């Protein structure tokens, strides 16, 4: 009888240890987008923006927390396209969601505005 109980407990312990843990942040296609950006593939900035905005939308749809850096990168891409309002808005969202990035994001905003702040 003790052997059966021991086997059952061992089996239960092994099976409960196999549960997968959901990631803390949603990255979507960010790793691919970042690679394409730095590799300077044949993907346009507009396409990168579209893909990252889709990632942000998917995170919202799934009620998942967007990974740090995605909104900042999206803001940077918008600034690169000359879309200042969108760019600054994404940078501010990054700062609001991740307060520890405030100093760096403020630095990026100041540089994008030409040092006038």
Image (cartoon, rainbow, N blue to C red):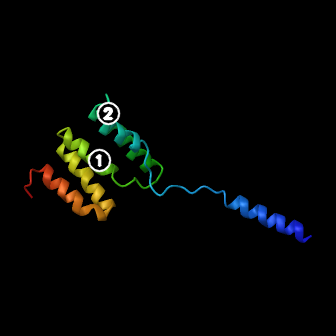
Outermost residue toward the front in this view = 39
In percent of the image, x 32 and y 30: which residue is there? 43
Neighbours of disc 1 within 10 Å: few (<14), some (14-19), many (20+): many
Residue 30 falls in image quadrant: top left
Occupied quadrant, residue 39: top left
Tell which residue pokes out farthest to the left in this image: 116
Give the residue pinned by disc 2: 47
Q: Can you say whether 96 is above or below 40 in the image? A: below
- Residue that carries the numbered disc 1 in the rendered image: 73
Q: In the picture shown, does residue 43 fall above or below 98?
A: above
The one of 98 and 89 positioned closer to us in this rendering = 98
In the structure shown, which secondary structural element does the residue marked by tag 2 occupy?
A: helix
Q: Residues within 10 Å of mark 2 (few under 14, many from 20)?
A: few
Q: Is residue 58 left or right of residue 39?
A: right
Q: Which one is earlier in the sequence, the residue at label 2 or at label 1?
A: 2
Residue 72 versus residue 82 in the image, above or below: below
Taking the image as shown, residue 3 lies to the left or right of residue 50, namely right
Q: Which residue is at a point 25% across and 42% down the rendered structure image?
A: 77
């Amino acid at each position: 009888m003790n052997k059966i109980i021991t086997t059952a407990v061992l089996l239960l312990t092994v099976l409960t240890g196999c549960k997968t843990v959901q990631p803390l942040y949603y990255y979507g296609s960010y790793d691919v987008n970042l690679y394409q950006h730095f590799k300077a593939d044949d993907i346009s900035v507009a396409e990168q923006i579209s893909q990252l905005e889709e990632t942000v939308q998917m995170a919202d749809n799934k009620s998942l927390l967007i990974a740090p850096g995605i909104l900042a990168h999206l803001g940077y891409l918008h600034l690169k396209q000359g879309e200042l309002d969108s760019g600054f808005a994404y940078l501010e969202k990054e700062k609001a969601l991740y307060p520890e990035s405030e100093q760096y994001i403020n630095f990026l905003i100041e540089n994008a505005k030409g040092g006038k702040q």
